[in-house]
Image (cartoon, grey):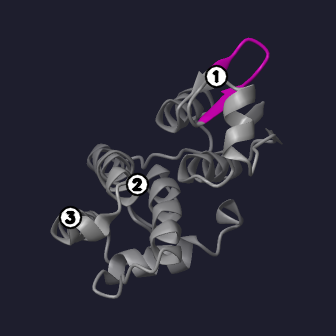
Amino acid sequence: MRLTGWSGGTPVARVRAALTLKRMSFDDQTSEDAQDYARRVPTLVLTLQGRTLRIPQSLAILNFLEEAFPDPPLLPEDIADRARARSLLNMMVCDLQPWLDAMPERRPDIWARLLAGTEHLCDPHGYAVGNTLSIADTCIVPELQRAMAAGHALEQYPNLVRIHAVAGMHRAFH
């Protein structure tokens, strides 16, 4: 499999993390030059390619990886925990990331509510959902890395800070 995309974005980071957690070898052909990538590849952010496969968009790729390569799983075994992992994934990717992209300093109230909601759904110990890295962590850690790099204070979200510290030590996030 080959991963192409702009290497500076969180979508590429979450897919790299999932591929690493799945113990899959892949050809990382991401580019640090977003304009160069845009000229070479017609999709917006990233693409996972195989012999007969071309999947753009990180969430579609994460779902494909979980369905096509179920072991090791990225979703918890318990159905309620699976739903929570998917909720956290969507909160990070669909709710929080657009606010990071749109400069959250313009609406700090929404930024704070989104982080508080994410904080509330995360487990108080271990990773985001349980004691194993999950699809939720593949989305939370890159977004928190991005937020921290931009100088956003996260101290009032101890679960998120812990998840970033614990999961961030795994090779999937380096």
Label 2, on which residue? Answer: 101
Nearer the observer: mark 2 or 3; the answer is 2
Q: Cα distance, mark 2 to mark 3?
A: 19 Å
Residue at 35% x, 50% y is 98
Quadrant of residue 130 within the rendered picture: bottom left
Residue at 48% x, 74% y is 150
The amino acid type found where label 2 is placed reads: Asp
Question: Do callouts 1 and 3 mark residues in contact (Cβ within 8 Å)?
Answer: no
For this view, does 86 lie left or right of residue 3?
left
Q: Cα distance, mark 1 to mark 3?
A: 35 Å
Which residue is more in the foreground, 47 or 118? 47
Mark 1 neighbour class, 10 Å CA radius: few under 14, some 14 to 19, many 20 or more: few
Image coordinates for residue 171, horizontal then vertical, percent: 71, 66
Image coordinates for residue 108, horizontal then vertical, percent: 22, 71
For this view, does 115 lie left or right of residue 172?
left
Residue at 48% x, 59% y is 137
Which residue is more in the foreground, 12 or 165? 12
Which callout, 1 or 3, points at the residue further toward the start of the chain? 1
Image coordinates for residue 13, horizontal then vertical, percent: 61, 53
Residue 42 numbered tag: 1
Residue 58 numbered tag: none
The amino acid type found where label 3 is placed reads: Gly
Which corner quadrant holds the N terminus? top right
Label 3, on which residue? Answer: 117
Q: Secondary structure at mark 1?
A: loop
- As for residue 2 lying within the magenta part, the answer is no
Q: Is residue 64 above or below residue 22?
A: above
Q: Secondary structure at mark 3?
A: helix
